[in-house]
């Protein structure tokens, strides 16, 4: 604590816990002691609270989640009550971030001053819980309650400027806010009125409170975030009529119930999985990432264009090469349209959009990429074409440049074999649309250097994406697993299910789309070509007969108006296909398969347990660093429901032993390979019950 040399005499209470000044037990003890000392010191007129390093506080310390320290005295509430009840005004000087518990601490203060670019929010719903330090009780008393509910249910961040417009901040500054905070405290002292305490204010709705709460509850039930949004609405509703003590007790009980829910456990698992993914195993501790300033992208199709935008949006200079002038022109048009859309939706202002577009320079010759620090190839999935690109790149770029392929399944080591230095070659598998999707599989071969791998991971992080290290197997992590998922979905059709049954069952589980809806949207010809590739490499490869039979008839999905469903011109919602039903009957008869009833539970088990079993094989083979990486790939790249935490986490919650029993049953009944139980699954089902 320091004292200002001002009138009034302000106690500057600060704390430091990099990187976001999380409110750990040690920080809470420090703040509580400093506040107590300031309140007891007759020389102090007011208190100004701020975090060091340009950040107020990012909230609770994630390292204390589910530990005794998280609830030990003093809590954020203990500090807040001390501040709120004091006769001396306290003002929160918010810079950088005030999130979660950090913002809740500020809500206990008598006033708040924020820098214009600070980010404020209560994002606890994203972890499956509600604000735990009376945020639901105070925010709707400070700003209009409908807006407060919206912010808490969405977990959205707002800037200091937005906060001031809403009434969440009493003043906003362009620079460091402490001096202005002292002025606000002086105004409170000069006014001589009772200090503003949010606990004493009523909840304020614009319009009828009951109608607004009913609307909020409908919205809470509609969003796929588990029980937390509903608990937030119930908290606000309860606080309107209950005493402060009753409302606080109700919130405490609700928070504990949410924290123990499977949804919260799953969301927090993914939260920690994102942080664990960046810890790369098996690299020399002395290895370091290389500097990257200029990035080359080869191929100006959909993926290449998205990759170029992702890098340009993050400040990299990009040279985009394609041998076709028409492809470069189409890419330019697509980029202009995407940036215009981002501006309309408020995702980018015109200055940022213009700067990003200017960073992408089209290249008419591959030689124009010669000074790139990193080159990403994004041409068609053809090994010969990719080898030709890498052969030429290898002779053009500098010896320290890293060469990456965006292939989604091809052998990175074979691609690297045409280069003089295979240690600088790896995979960077982006997901479409590449400038939006957050996941990147960073694929290493046995030859990939630690420096190249760390550079790819560092670059991915700078893009604001999640890098997951994968081994060099066919399909890496995600596409290798999805092959089994689609195999089982097609097998279910052969045995009696319809595409709609399968899709509805998996949407009921939590997927945004079922496998057949997804396949029709992506194009069934893509999977068909992949099956042909598998068969060429392995003549014993087998897949349910219906898939090739439909593809051979040109039923490629939405783009042809017919796939697993029928589509009228311009429609995206498919109708059941009588022709497909007839073809299924024909295929079943030819394969000697008798149609039988199949329920939703079996559909989910067959498809999801196939992911679990293949994931366990990937883990035991060393192609994934940890089970949580597999969960991350599937949740962030393939739509596995967040509230289930990923296939491996879900399996641990269900129980590995009963899942193994079901897999053994499927193995004995199936006509197709892949159900052989993973050795790791067998081992862990009989021991720890967990994968990591």
Image: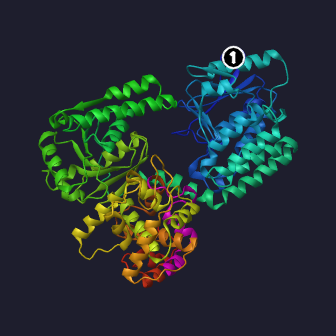
Q: Residue at x 36, y 33 (%)?
A: 335
* Residue annotated with mark 1: 183
Give 377 or 574, whichever is nearer the viewer. Answer: 574
Give 575 or 684, whichever is nearer the viewer. Answer: 575
Chain part drawn in magenta: 637-662
Whole-percent x, y for residue 478 in the image: 39, 59
Q: Residue at x 57, y 54 (%)?
A: 268
- Residue 294 visible to an observer of this rendering: yes
On screen, residue 111 above or below 555: above
Examine the structure image and report whether residue 647 is included in the region drawn in magenta: yes
Whole-percent x, y for residue 144 in the image: 74, 32
Whole-percent x, y for residue 299 in the image: 25, 42
On screen, residue 237 above or below 166: below
Marks counted in the figure total 1
User: For the stretch drawn in magenta, what is the main secondary structure?
Assistant: helix
Q: Locate residue 374: give its quadrant.
A: top left
Quadrant of image for the N terminus: top right
Q: Are there few (<14), some (14-19), or many (20+) residues within 10 Å of tag 1?
A: some
- Residue 329 placement, left or right of 255: left
Q: Residue at x 36, y 55 (%)?
A: 469
- Residue 250 placement, left or right of 20: right
- Residue 174 placement, left or right of 202: left
Q: Locate residue 528: give its quadrant.
A: bottom left
Q: Locate residue 599: give its quadrant.
A: bottom right
- Residue 2 visible to an observer of this rendering: no
On screen, residue 319 above or below 576: above
Examine the structure image and report whether residue 640 is included in the region drawn in magenta: yes
Whole-percent x, y for residue 156 in the image: 60, 39
Q: Secondary structure at mark 1?
A: helix
């Amino acid at each position: 604590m320091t004292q200002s040399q001002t009138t009034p005499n302000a106690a500057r209470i600060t704390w430091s816990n990099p990187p976001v000044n999380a409110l750990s037990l040690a920080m809470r003890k420090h703040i509580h002691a400093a506040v107590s000392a300031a309140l007891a010191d007759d020389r102090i007129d007011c208190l100004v609270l701020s975090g060091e390093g340009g950040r107020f506080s990012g909230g609770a310390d994630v390292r204390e989640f589910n530990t005794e320290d998280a609830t030990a005295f003093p809590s954020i509430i203990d500090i807040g009550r001390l501040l709120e009840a004091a006769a001396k005004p306290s003002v929160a000087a918010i810079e950088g971030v005030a999130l979660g518990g950090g913002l809740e601490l500020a809500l206990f203060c008598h006033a708040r001053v924020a820098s214009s670019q600070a980010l404020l929010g209560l994002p606890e719903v994203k972890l499956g819980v509600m604000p735990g330090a009376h945020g639901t009780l105070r925010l709707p008393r400070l700003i209009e309650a409908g807006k407060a509910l919206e912010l808490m249910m969405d977990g959205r961040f707002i800037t200091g400027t937005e906060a001031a417009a809403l009434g969440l901040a009493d003043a906003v500054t362009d620079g460091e806010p402490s001096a202005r905070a002292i002025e606000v405290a002086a105004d409170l002292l000069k006014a001589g009125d009772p200090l503003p305490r949010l606990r004493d204010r009523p909840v304020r709705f614009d319009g009828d409170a009951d109608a607004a709460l009913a609307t909020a509850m409908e919205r809470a039930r509609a969003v796929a975030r588990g029980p937390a949004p509903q608990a937030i609405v119930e908290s606000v509703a309860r606080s309107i009529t209950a005493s402060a003590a009753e409302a606080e007790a109700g919130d405490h009980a609700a928070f504990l119930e949410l924290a123990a829910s499977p949804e919260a456990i799953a969301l927090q698992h993914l939260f920690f999985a994102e942080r664990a993914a960046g810890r790369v195993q098996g690299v020399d501790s002395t290895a370091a990432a290389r500097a990257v300033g200029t990035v080359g992208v080869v191929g100006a199709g959909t993926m290449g264009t998205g990759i170029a935008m992702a890098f340009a949006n993050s400040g990299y200079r990009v040279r985009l090469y394609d041998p076709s002038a028409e492809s470069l022109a189409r890419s330019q048009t697509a980029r202009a349209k995407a940036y215009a859309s981002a501006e309309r939706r408020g995702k980018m202002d015109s200055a940022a959009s213009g700067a990003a577009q200017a960073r992408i320079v089209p290249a008419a010759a591959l030689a124009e990429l010669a000074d790139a620090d990193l080159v990403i190839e994004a041409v068609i999935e053809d090994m010969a074409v990719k080898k030709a690109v890498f052969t030429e790149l290898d002779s053009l770029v500098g010896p320290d440049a890293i060469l990456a392929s965006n292939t989604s399944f091809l052998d990175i080591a074979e691609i690297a074999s045409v280069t003089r230095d295979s240690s600088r070659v790896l995979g960077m598998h982006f997901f479409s649309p590449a400038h939006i999707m957050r996941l990147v599989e960073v694929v290493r071969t046995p030859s990939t250097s630690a420096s190249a791998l760390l550079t790819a991971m560092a670059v991915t992080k700078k893009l604001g994406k999640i890098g997951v290290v994968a081994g060099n197997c066919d399909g890496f992590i995600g596409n290798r697993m999805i092959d089994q998922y689609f195999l089982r979905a097609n097998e279910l059709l052969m045995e009696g299910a319809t595409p709609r049954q399968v899709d509805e069952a998996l949407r009921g589980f939590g997927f945004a789309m079922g496998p057949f809806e997804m396949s029709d949207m992506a194009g069934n010809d893509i999977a068909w070509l992949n099956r042909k590739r598998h068969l060429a490499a392995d003549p014993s490869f087998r897949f349910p007969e219906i898939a090739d039979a439909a593809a051979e008839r040109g039923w490629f999905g939405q783009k042809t108006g017919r796939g697993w469903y029928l589509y009228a011109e311009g429609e995206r919602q498919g109708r059941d296909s009588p022709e497909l039903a007839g073809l299924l009957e024909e295929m079943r008869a030819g394969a000697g398969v008798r149609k039988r009833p199949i329920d939703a539970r079996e559909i989910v088990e067959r498809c999801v347990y196939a992911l679990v079993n293949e994931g366990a094989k990937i883990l035991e083979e060393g192609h994934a660093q940890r089970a949580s990486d597999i969960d991350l790939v599937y949740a962030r790249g393939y739509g596995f429901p967040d509230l289930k935490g990923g296939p491996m986490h879900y399996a641990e919650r269900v129980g590995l032993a009963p899942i193994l029993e079901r897999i053994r049953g499927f193995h004995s009944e199936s006509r197709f390979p892949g159900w052989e139980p993973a050795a790791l699954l067998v081992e862990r089902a009989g021991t720890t019950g967990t994968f990591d």
